[in-house]
Image (tube, rainbow, N blue to C red):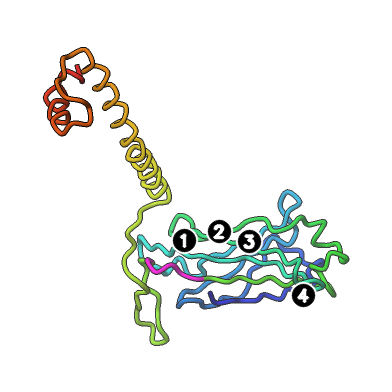
């Protein structure tokens, strides 16, 4: 993953509802961070978004894994890190979450705001099935990875659910077979089987009576 660090000074004096970082390039895509310095519902939210979404072609899709972090400048072990994985596209070009309560952030003893300066970081790694071409230094499109094979998040969830159900069915099959065999053995006890159960011919006898067992 490639990293971008955003240093926000005079944090407590910010009056804007949304604060944007400079645009940065990771995996040949342009990104930026968005922050709500005044907090929404008393929480501070941070978002990662595609910076040039309006210039991308129709149907673009960029799956990415990313970490959003609020750096604790007194004790790095208390740094807040959230690991995320989302698909950025024309409907959802921005993803984020709440990192901390505004009261805790503004409390200087907590270590997240030192000298009225806040440090946030993001690490991004584009998944290798991105369908949207990035651009190289000359402006020519460059495809990263191969065309995506998955559909929407709903479709992916449906596929995963079907796989789990199918797996459960396959897991149950051996037990059903054992039950059927026991049923057959009980039903055949009413017929005159000239062979003991462990006799080689017993299997042939069971096969002959199989239709009756299922009736």
Q: Label 4, secondary structure: give it.
A: loop
Q: Earlier in the sequence, mark 4 or mark 1?
A: 4
Q: Residue 107: which numbered mark, if any?
A: none
* Residue that numbered label 2 is attached to: 95
Observer-nearest of 34 and 100: 100
* Residue that numbered label 4 is attached to: 9
Q: Nearer the viewer, mark 4 or mark 1?
A: 1
Residue for point 63% across, 56% down: 97
Q: How far is disc 2 from disc 1 in space, using C-alphas?
A: 8 Å
Q: How far is disc 4 from disc 3 in space, using C-alphas?
A: 23 Å
Q: How far is disc 4 from disc 2 in space, using C-alphas?
A: 24 Å
Q: Earlier in the sequence, mark 4 or mark 2?
A: 4
* Residue that numbered label 3 is attached to: 82
Query: Which quarter shows the C terminus?
Result: top left
Q: How far is disc 1 from disc 3 in space, using C-alphas?
A: 17 Å
Task: Using a 10 Å C-alpha cutoff, classify the residue at mark 3 as few (fewer than 14 neighbours), some (14 to 19) or many (20 or more).
Answer: some
Image-based side of 100 in relation to 130, left or right = right
Asked if residue 212 lies in the magenta stretch, the reply is no
* Residue that numbered label 1 is attached to: 88
Q: Main secondary structure of the magenta part?
A: loop
Q: Label 3, secondary structure: give it.
A: strand
Residue for point 79% across, 61% down: 105
Q: Earlier in the sequence, mark 1 or mark 3?
A: 3
Write the start and end of the magenta stretch as one range.
Answer: 125-129
| Furthest-right residue in this view | 109
Q: Earlier in the sequence, mark 3 or mark 2?
A: 3
């Amino acid at each position: 993953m490639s990293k971008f660090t955003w240093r926000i000074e005079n944090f407590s004096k910010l009056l804007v509802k949304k604060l944007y970082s400079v645009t940065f390039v990771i995996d040949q895509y342009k990104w930026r961070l968005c922050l709500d310095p005044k907090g929404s519902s008393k929480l501070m939210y941070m978002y990662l978004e595609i910076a040039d979404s309006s210039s991308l072609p129709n149907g673009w899709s960029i799956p990415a894994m990313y970490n959003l972090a609020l750096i604790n400048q007194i004790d790095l072990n208390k740094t807040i890190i959230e690991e995320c994985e989302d698909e950025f596209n024309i409907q959802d070009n921005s993803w984020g979450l709440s990192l901390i309560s505004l009261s805790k952030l503004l409390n200087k003893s907590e270590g997240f705001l030192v000298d009225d300066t806040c440090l946030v970081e993001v690490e991004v790694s584009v998944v290798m099935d991105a369908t949207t071409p990035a651009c190289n230094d000359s402006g020519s499109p460059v495809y990263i990875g191969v065309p995506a094979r998955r559909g929407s998040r709903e479709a992916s969830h449906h596929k995963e659910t079907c796989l789990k159900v199918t797996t459960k069915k396959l897991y149950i099959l051996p037990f059903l077979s054992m039950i059927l065999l026991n049923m057959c053995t009980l039903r055949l006890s009413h017929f005159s089987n000239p062979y003991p159960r462990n006799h080689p011919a017993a299997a042939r006898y069971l096969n002959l009576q199989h239709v009756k067992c299922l009736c």
